[in-house]
Amino acid sequence: MAGLIDRLNADKKPSEKSGFIDTAITREVTGFERLKEKVHSKLIDDMPQTIMNEANQDKKRAMLRDRILSTAQEEGQKLNIVLSSRDLETLSQHLLDDMIGFGPIQKLLDQEEISEVMVNGPFQIYIERKGKLILTDVKFKDNDHVMRIIERIVAPIGRRIDESVPYVDARLPDGSRVNAIIPPLALNGPTITIRKFKKEALGIEDMVRFGTLTAEMAEFLKACIKVRLNVVVSGGTGSGKTTTLNILSSFIPEDERIITCEDAAELQLRQPHVVRLETRPANIEGKGAVPMRELIKNTLRMRPERVIVGECRGGEALDMLQAMNTGHDGSLTTGHANTPRDMLARLETMVLMAGMDLPVRAIREQIASAVHMIVQQSRLKDGSRKITYLTEIQGMEGDKIVMQDIFKFEQSGIDDKGKIIGRLKPTGIRPKFASKFEESGIHLAANIFTDTAKGW
């Protein structure tokens, strides 16, 4: 007997057939849905303690799967519903995902090539694959179903979400970053955005292979980190800032004490001496919050040699700049901006958000003396990610911060497949801090800053 899902798909037009298993299952399948609800209810009411107490997740999943299949067969006989072995497997997969996974989106999270999952209410789920957004056929049952998955995400890390706190930043057990926002703020229903965590951290060689930067730029960046330059990674949402920050952090020597501060911990530092700190939201009484500013201030009492702030969004930028200016050279952070010059304007705005009544010139002097270089990361229209500028901060000239591009991406056109054609190249300008390389015994290729260097 053909599987129930196969029979349904056979009746569909080709355009209606899904590349994914439709986890909501077509509403006409009343028998399948009825059985699934019955099995789910039965398992909740009568779950063996041995399964609940099993610590090994793989073993727990196998035990629960066997229990689901046996219960489905028992309840199917009572309801006079006969499913094929394939349909039983599909039912068990749905229930496993619902009970110990993240529901319908678990299948998307398991696919390595998917980099982001976006749930816009229960019936519209997008993914990002190779830089492009794609609408899937995956669905939740209703708003309550989405809310149950959100609760499962936030509860283990002590976060909460309800009408009084209708949005939350969290992370999955594998480190994937999650943002959730619920009604009444989210008009389409509960919304989840998951930036997936790569199981294998990318290296600088991978970025060169992907065309994100050139081998010369990679050598230059490695030298910048080793000589303890303060670097800000700038870019738009989804441009790859955190990935770049991770890779830059990998060049920090292993004998240095590194302290990281993040809203949701996702950095993957491999050095042995790393202290990871994470902000904390207010509790149900509105107390106990530990914002990023307090975290950075405390960090400076912990004898750090490098301070890495996952992202500067507000007044903590002032504390980060002060750390960079007070003996913590080689510190790193990221910020949202579309160009290096925009990043400087953002830093000014964020410093003002700290509530300090500082003149603009004083803020700019603080920035110019603290930040040595901006790494501009961009996601281009074809979905590719590139480091489009490596820009040196050279100091002040009057009331203006002087900047100089060292490397930049030069676009020359678009091919017939919509891919952007261009080249990453040096500008021919040698940075003022280049003398630090020689002082530290780092000898870069003589032509690295000239346009005769190998391009991309």
Image: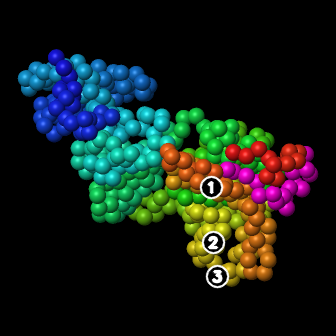
Q: Nearer the viewer, residue 77 or 88?
A: 88
Residue behind mark 2: 345
Label 2: which secondary element: helix
**Of pointers 3 and 1, the one earlier in the residue sequence:** 3
Q: Which mark is residue 357?
A: 3
Q: CA distance from mark 3 to mark 2?
A: 17 Å
- At label 1, the amino acid type is Gln
Tell me residue 236's x, y (percent).
Answer: 55, 58
**Chain part drawn in magenta:** 423-442
Residue behind mark 1: 411
Among the 4 quarters of the image, the one containing residue 263: bottom right
The magenta stretch spans residue 432: yes
Q: CA distance from mark 2 to mark 1?
A: 25 Å
Asked if residue 294 can be seen in this view, the reply is: no
Label 1: which secondary element: strand
Quadrant of the rendering where the N terminus is positioned:
top left
Asked if residue 106 can be seen in this view, the reply is: yes
**Of pointers 2 and 1, the one earlier in the residue sequence:** 2
Q: Nearer the viewer, mark 2 or mark 1?
A: 1
- At label 3, the amino acid type is Asp
- At label 2, the amino acid type is Ala
